[in-house]
Amino acid sequence: MKKQEFIGSKINDRKIRYLFHDPGTSRIEAVLARGDRKLSRALAIAAEEGFVFDAWDECFHYDKWLSVFEKADIDPSFYANRAFGKDEVLPWDIIDCGVDKSFFLRESQKAYEEKTTPNCREMCSACGANKLGGERSCCPKAKK
Ligand code: SF4
């Protein structure tokens, strides 16, 4: 919220429209997006307590979600407010989208170094997607 206020305070041009997401909603979304199977307890409790249409501002109650996490013995900060370690096994590692995890880690490092990756049509960066193959693949290498 402080960051949002800071950015808002620096925008003095009336032509610029500053939109931002509610930080409470973002935090709950972060917990749900980064959570593992332990989170199922919280989702079951939320369902039992009648949580519906939480994407709508008028139906979203941040404090009620914190209460649900407490009842499920979930620390929301464990999911939403920490960096994942590079060697950490992540809940979604079981999903094979074709692109190798090592590629994502390399890309993450490059982003911090402000380095770009060439377009696939110019040079293959060996992301791993070519192994999926098939006509519907977005990898130009797989279509050859
Ligand atoms: S050409 Fe294919 S394998 Fe190479 S980086 Fe692009 S998508 Fe990945």
Image (cartoon, helix red, strand yellow):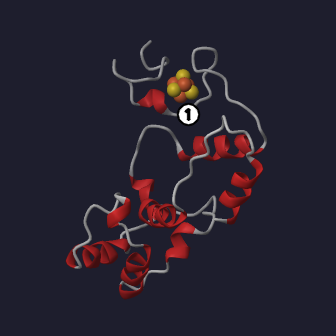
The structure residue drawn at horizontal position 60% and vertical position 22%, both measured from the top left corner, is 124
In the image: residue 62, left or right of residue 114: left
What residue is disc 1 on? 127
The image quadrant where one finds the N terminus is bottom right
Mark 1 is surrounded, within 10 Å at the Cα level, by few (under 14), some (14 to 19) or many (20 or more) other residues, namely: some
What's the residue type where badge 1 is placed? Cys
Image location of residue 36, percent across then percent down: 41, 67
In the image: residue 34, left or right of residue 116: left
> In the rendered view, would you say 100 is above or below 90?
above
Foreground pick, 72 / 143: 72
The quarter of the image that holds ligand 1 is: top right
> In the rendered view, would you say 78 is above or below 3?
below
Image location of residue 104, percent across then percent down: 59, 43
Outermost residue, front side: 14
Image location of residue 35, percent across then percent down: 43, 66
- The yes-or-no answer for disc 1 within 8 Å of ligand 1 is yes
